[in-house]
Every structure is written in structure tokens, then in C-alpha cells.
Amino acid sequence: MKSQPVHQGRLKTPFHSRLAALDTVNEWHQWKGYSSADSLFCEDVEYFAIRNATAVFDLTPMTKYRITGPDALDYLNRLVTRDMAKIRPGRVAYAVWCDDHGQVIDDGTIFHLREGEYRLCSQERHFAWLKAAAIGFDVTITHETEDVAALAVQGPTSFSVLKTMGLEGLEELKPFGLTHFEFQGSELMVSRTGFTADLGYELWIDPDKAEALWDALFEAGKLYGIRAIGTHALELARIEAGFLAAYMEFLPADETVRTGVSRSPLELGLEWLVDFKKPNFNGRRALAEEKRNGSTWRLVKLDIEGNKPAHHSYIFGNEKANKGQIGFVTSAAWSPVCKQNIALGTVRTPYGKPGSSVWVEIYYQREMHWNRMMAKATVVDKPFWFPPRRGATPPGPY
């Protein structure tokens, strides 16, 4: 097994030169050792590129592991709660993996690249844990974050841009599918995946071809409103989609210090990812017990009255039996496209059932003065943003 690289200082992705040339605000942060842009021009403009045109986000710092070998499928099925035997070559699966107590360590996507060949992508790094979990399996695990450059290409005109770039046959690619193209003598993998709940793709290529891919993409997108974006715009789209983020909706179970602060997939609304019909997997016994006895927490999506985002807010019960605190908001935003004050949060069961009402305590500052308000909120069970084009095959031209 290839060891995980260790670096001093901050790395630059293969797309950094192109991003730096567009940067006007100099707002960057560290993403697993790489420089990643918060925004490049204006996060509002970048957000509307996601919803109205084509947005391009540098995905290279996402942690990537290649998993191969005769026992690759058995290994992954032991590792994650989902039945990976159902994910055939050319498909991508969203998955979570847990510790022995059924608490989520992380979530991510698993690409079934070819028969017996997988790529696991996640926010956090798990090389040591993946190696320990591989004991007894004939598998090879390779840390390949630096070996693969990646772009998220998202928005209603993304298909038109990629089609103009010459990717023939892309119209046949279904959501969570992947396919391969030739690009300047190198292999370009395109997956119909993303973190925006909109029509979109992710592009994966050798780092040596990264700048050439960027140039070809932006040349093809000149008439389609293509724009590079930073993390802030993507984060707003993520909340509208109702997607989870580590350190927001949950803490990785292997990094917590206190008990009771991590979450199980059942508590995160991910019961559909837990397959009790397959053989043993990490955390199965604890999750089966939780399913029998009930969960302590429940993830909720909130439609909140007013227009003040409920950042870091407490959630209170609406029933006469409990007017006290029942939970807290984990992510919040005013959604420009939905025209809603939205939030994700976690509440104690049995509260937070879809259709029920709760109260959210919101603090906001105006001209140095803090204001407090109690806003009524409704628990909803659907994503805030889920346009039909997201799943249309073939995608319509925009």
C-alpha cells in the first residue's frame, strides 16, 4: 500500500494558475493542505452562475483513494453501510461509513470505475483507518489525491458547455453515471455528480492535462455564462440541496472527544443507505439496536419565517408539553432562488416530524446592535431546490 504523502506548507492545485488569474478579492482558505478560494469575484454572482449558467469549482483537494484487488467489493461492503454489490461498473454511489458504535466517520462517493476497481472520495483523510479495515482482505489501497485533478462543472448550461467542448455521447449519461473520453492523449473521466442539486458533472483527469482542460472548457463556455466559483457559493447551493457536510451536520466519529456529539446514519436521515439484508458491516449491531429502540436525534429541514438567516440558532418546541430547547441549527441561509429562509438542524426525537412546527431563536446584528427574534419554522421533508433538469436524460439544451 502506498503511503499517504506529507507536505510542509500549502499546496497549489494544477488549476491554481487559472484561478489566480481570475481572483480579484484574495480570499483563500486551506482545504486539506491545498489553497482553495472562498470566492474569486463576488460570491453572489458566483452563486447565480450555479443556478443560471455554468459554475466551475476546483475539486482537486477532495481526498481520493483507489481500491483494487480480488476482495475490493467484499472490502467495501464490510466498510460501508450500503450494499455495494448493487453498484455496477460505470456507476457512482453515495455512502457513509461508521465505527463499531454505528456513528458516522464520514460520507462520500464511491466510483465503480471498472470491474473490481473503485475510487472512494471524501472530505476527510482516512488512510490509516482504511488500511486497518483492510486486514484480512486481498486489496490494494492507494492514496491518489495528488494524482487526479478534478473540476465540478455545475448549472443548467453545463451540458451544453461540455457538448460544445466535443464530448459526444454525453447526453446518454444518467445521474450517478460515469463515462470516459479521450482528451489530448489522456483519459478524461466524466461523472454526472455534484454538490449543488442541479444539472452538473465532475471532470477527472491527469494533472498534466489540467490547464489544457480548463482552457478548453472555458473556451467552450464563452457563450454559456461560464464562471469559476469559490467555496462560499457552493456552500449556499449545498444547503439548498439539503446535503450534509462534515463538521456542520455531523462530527466525524473518530475525531470526537465527548460522547453523545456524533451521529448515526439513522439520525442523519440516511436510513436508506443502511442495508441490514447484506452481511456484516462496521456498526451493524449498534445500528440494528438503534433501529429497534429508536434514535436520539433527528435531522430536520426548516422553512423559517422572515428573512434573517438562523446561523447557530437554538430550536425550541412548539407543543404545550415542551416549550424548551429541543435542538439547534447546523446550517442556515437565505435562499435567493427559493425565496426562503432555510436551515438544516438536529432535534431530539420524537420532535421534528415533517409538517410539524418549531420555533427558532435568531440573533442578528445591525449597526453594532444585536437583535433577538423568535421565528416560527415548519419542518419539511423535501430538498429546498430540486429542479427537473437535475435528473433529465438527455438534459435539455439551455
Image (tube, rainbow, N blue to C red):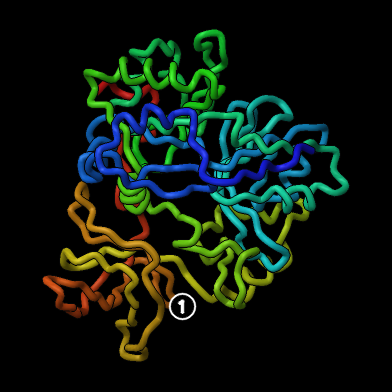
Vertical position of residue 259 compared to residue 266: above or below: below
Which secondary structure lies at badge 1? strand
- Please tell me in which quadrant of the rendered image residue 295 appears: bottom right
Q: How many marks?
A: 1
Residue at far bottom of view: 321
| Residue at 61%, 39% in the rendered image | 64
Query: Is residue 394 shown above or below 123?
Result: above
Residue 20 shown left or right of residue 59 in the figure: left
Residue 81: image location, x then y, percent: 66, 53
Residue 108 seen anywhere in this rendered image of the structure: yes
Side of 239 relative to 263 (left or right):
left
Q: Quadrant of the N terminus?
A: top right
Residue lying at 43% horizontally and 70% vertically, measured from the top left: 346
Q: Alpha-carbon neighbours of circle 1 within 10 Å: few (<14), some, or many (≥20)?
A: some
Q: Return the x and y of residue 288 as percentages of the image width and height.
A: 68, 66
Would you name the residue on which mark 1 appears? 348
Residue 51 seen in the figure: no
Q: Residue furthest right?
A: 136
Q: Is residue 34 above or below residue 242?
A: above
Depth check: give the residue in front, 238 or 214: 214
- Give whichever of 386, 292 is nearer the camera: 386
Question: Which amino acid lies under the numbered mark 1 shown in the image of this protein?
Answer: Arg
Q: Who's the residue at 32% across and 88% down the image? A: 323
Residue found farthest to the left: 367
Is residue 257 rendered to the left or right of residue 278? Answer: left
Which quadrant does the C terminus fall into?
Answer: top left
Tell me the residue at 32%/20% (across/down).
Answer: 218
**Spot occupied by residue 97 in the image (x, y as percentages of width and height):** 64, 54
- Give percent across and percent down for residue 282: 73, 58
Residue 150 vs 384, above or below: the answer is above
